[in-house]
Amino acid sequence: MVEEYLAGTEDDHFQIPEGHRSGFVAVIGKPNVGKSTLINAILGEKVAIATPKPQTTRIQQLGILTRSDAQVIFIDTPGIHKPQHALGKFMVETAVRALQDADGILFLTDVSHDITAEDRNVAGYLPEIGAENVLIRVLNKVDLAGAPLEYQRRVDEHLGLCPFTEWLTTIASEGKGINDLVETLIQHLPEGPRYYPPDQVSDLWTREIAAEMIREAALLLTQEEVPHSVAVAVNEFKERPNGMLYISAELYVERDSQKGIVVGKGGRMIKQISSQAREEIEAFLKQRVYLDLHVKVLKNWRRDENALRRLGYRIER
């Protein structure tokens, strides 16, 4: 039975039609510009967390779009910024490596605002990339770009930021412009194999996605001073005999005062975080979840490379 299943899997998953296109596409931009929202819109489901907080994305994650004629592997990168600590340095290095390894690049900017120094900082990394790369400029939030004259001024300003292969406009939060973007991108990818099974939408383990959803809930519900200082480690991820999934996780902050905020008066905040995260995890896994959260202090963990490794960040020595 196992041999038959594996044989069927190979036939079904990796035998592809002539002319099939595939490739890895890095999605880049400044922090909080909407990269994860764009990838979720392209895939039609939530695989990357997205919040209004800058630098929400910390790790590289793949979002995988599979069609009969193509497979596009989107690399959701941390926002490129000027790092202030070891975690920030890790995030920027992760994003730059993704640029160097990609078959194509989507460079996303927010056309509802003028170009910023952060946008120019991102563009400054592009000369390091070979001229053979496809670079598609994506102007997001086009609905908020202003009246016609203001709209045209902003579009011209954004397109002048760097050379590009193609440009398109999107409203990622509403899914508008997504189909045109995907079709344009696929036209520029080389012919190639299917790298992942068609039902796989992310390269993260399920427990890693759960950890990200817990962190997302904490980011959305806590005060300004807390979000950047929160890390999540899942310690136990086990299905019980009754079919319920038991997840035990720890939220790490850097100071006792932050722990007080995350726990909340009478434990109210951590209960809200747990409830919101549990609903997201259950919706993703389509399974009932018991979520057990604890908050701990790990002083200055963002500046400590050993602490970053303990928390699962792949810091190179």
Image (tube, rainbow, N blue to C red):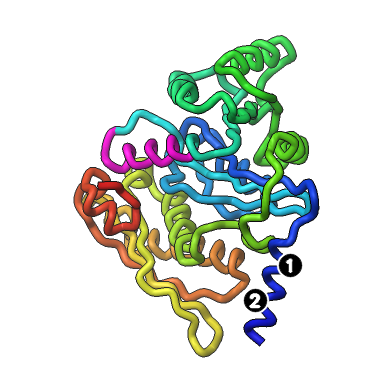
Q: Position of residue 86 (x, y in %)?
A: 27, 41
**Label 1 is placed on what type of residue?**
Asp
Q: Is residue 162 above or below residue 234?
A: above
Q: Position of residue 39 (x, y in %)?
A: 61, 45
Disc 1 designates what residue?
Answer: 12
Labelled disc at residue 6? 2
Say if the magenta span includes residue 167.
Answer: no
Q: Nearer the viewer, residue 243 or 306?
A: 306
Q: Which residue: 72% across, 42% down?
A: 175
Say if the magenta span includes residue 95.
Answer: yes
Alpha carbon distance from label 1 to label 2? 10 Å
**Does residue 165 appear anywhere in the picture?**
yes
Helix, strand or loop status at disc 2: helix
- Our reading of the magenta stretch's main secondary structure is helix
Q: Closer to the N terminus: mark 1 or mark 2?
A: 2
Q: Position of residue 48 (x, y in %)?
A: 54, 51
**Does residue 54 appear anywhere in the picture?**
no
Total number of numbered labels?
A: 2
Give the magenta-colored segment's residue range.
84-98
**Label 2 is placed on what type of residue?**
Leu
- Left or right placement of residue 27 versus residue 271 in this view: right
